[in-house]
Amino acid sequence: MLKDFVKNIGYDDPLEIYLSKLEKLLGSEYGISKRAVSLLLLQEDEEIFELVKKNEGDKIGVISAIIREANSHYSNPLSYIISERRQGEASRITNSVMSVKEKGLFNFKETLSRLMMNPFIGGPILLAVMYYGLYKFVGNFGAGVLVDFIEKRIFDAHINPFMVDLVNRYLPYELLRDLLAGQYGIITLGARYAFAIILPIVATFFFAFAIIEDTGYLPRLAMLIDQLFKKIGLSGRAVIPLVLGLGCSTMATMVTRTLPTKRERIIATLLLSLAIPCSAQMGVILALLQNKPLGLLIWLGVIIGVFLFVGYLASKIMPGELPSFYMEIPPLRLPQLSNILRKTGSRLKWYLFEVLPLFIFASVLIWLGQITGVFGFLVKALEHPVRWIGLPAQSSVAFLFGFFRRDYGAAGLYDLKTAGLLSGNQLVVACVTLTLFLPCVAQLLMNIKERGIGVGIIMSTFILFFSFSVGYFVNLVLILSGINL
Amino acid sequence: MTTKPSRPAVALTTLGSGGKGNIAYLQTKNKAQMQKLLSIGAIPGVHITLMQKFPSYVFKIGHSQFAVDKELAQGIFVRVPVPK
């Protein structure tokens, strides 16, 4: 049995004496040996302390006293003393059985790893990863080729006409016909957006992200960007949820749990809600600004500016522990296709289960809003701020949609552009405002779930006013500088 | 065990990149920082190689590489062996 081979690591005398005292005091079963529990107690593990407190009742006073006394014998924390002793034992064992071969002079993986972490070469590598991974693969292939194919060849050509025909033939009620296959119907709008526009974009993004993740590139990026992120109250570690946010900010908000402090989690959630466009939204924005490279550049500049500015302000305002950065840099690996497919698949499954019901829900809400007139009222109310930032009143529909799903909003603008209702300047202002505007319903709910209702509401109110203010400002600057895009 | 001749311990941040030594002790502002260093295996006695200093500190302990910020790196004190 394994047990026969297990030998305890011996510690020096005072520590062993306190350990045996603790072991004798422990009465309950913990599933691990009493020695292990005692060692954790001496290392001041909070979780185990709470457990022992619950199980041992009155004895906790004596136990705490022993821990204090043991600590007073050493100038360093006991966790330090214990780690040191374990390290010594581990080295002794490995040294007796392992020999290390000297590596050759040139090692491709190591060289590439160093280039990725080089502050001067790392930047261009990041740009290349963004350009090919995001712009070319997700933007051009996912949002362009795949969306075109599924939307035009499958939905517009087959599914939508078929459903409209079916509904018209068998459903005698106008209201129900609208709900299923009307302009904003569950099938004609909800399912079409979910499967034809969003799914291909999100799928290509998750695929690209899984490749990047599996190579071990992200910790290297985190290490490069840490100093910049410290200025906005985050550590390099936050680069992982933020990059994931470029795919789906809702999922990324859930991933902010991996950040160590509450302060970092709140700042990351705010930036994800405000300044990180998700892949669905980005896909449509890239399509909107397709022939306007200067417009795209202005959009990018404003969004990055807002990201840094708001992050900087938040880090000045928010109280709490300053972030610290430490991360393992794993060896670079060639990703395995089977792993990538599995990861992409499980993320897509999450996305479909989480999002498809919301699409249907949003369609129902829009339908309800329309028959009750609430929708019309809200569209009218939004026309004011929309005109204020120099856009035609019709675009307020896109903004209202934007709240139900951010990408609905962007796709709504796409329809306006196709109809020739937006000038170049208006297009850029609309894209900027919509990117910053309130997150989609799913993300709003996730914000509240992860950060609490108070923080969720304060954030949303701030974002509502801030996004239109930035839109107003961009419009003003464009007019004053006489730029016509 | 024989002790090798060595210089007094210095902060890891004072080494140049490529510098090597054994960790002598850790000295951090608070317990949380020490816990972070211990968790990545920066423990007295282990051999450490500093690989890079900017924009973050990257070092090698055993077969693993780690990146830490300056604040944490300042807490690691190493003893650099005297060259033969």
Image (cartoon, coloured by chain):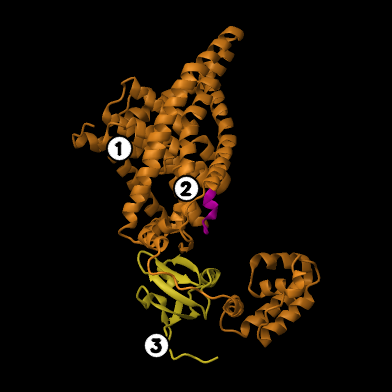
Chain colours: A orange, B yellow
Q: Quadrant of residue A106?
A: bottom left
At label 3, the amino acid type is: Val
Residue B15 visible within the image? yes
Q: Is A184 located above or below residue A333 in the figure?
A: above
List the residue tagged with mark 3.
Answer: B82
Locate residue A292 relative to residue A343 in the image: left or right. Answer: left
Q: Is residue A257 magenta?
A: yes
- Name the mark on residue A165: none
Query: At numbered mark 3, what does the secondary structure look like: helix, strand or loop?
Result: loop
- Name the mark on residue A296: 1
Query: At numbered mark 1, what does the secondary structure look like: helix, strand or loop?
Result: helix
How far apart marks 2 and 1 lie (CA) works out to 26 Å
Q: Quadrant of residue A418?
A: top left
The residue closer to the viewer here, A314 or A80, is A80
Q: Residue furthest left?
A: A482
Both labels 3 and 2 in a single chain = no
Q: Which residues are magenta?
A: A255-261
Residue plotted at (58% across, 40% down): A350
Q: Is A253 located above or below residue A178 in the figure?
A: below
The chain carrying label 3 is B
Q: Is residue A434 magenta?
A: no
The chain carrying label 1 is A
Residue plotted at (50% across, 69% down): B63
At label 1, the amino acid type is: Leu
Residue A24 x, y percent position in the rendering: 79, 78
List the residue tagged with mark 2.
Answer: A211
Q: Is B51 located above or below residue A168 in the figure?
A: below
Residue A170 x, y percent position in the rendering: 61, 8
Residue plotted at (52% across, 39% down): A444
How far apart marks 1 and 3 lie (CA) works out to 58 Å
Residues at circles 3 and 2 in contact by the CB criterion of under 8 Å: no
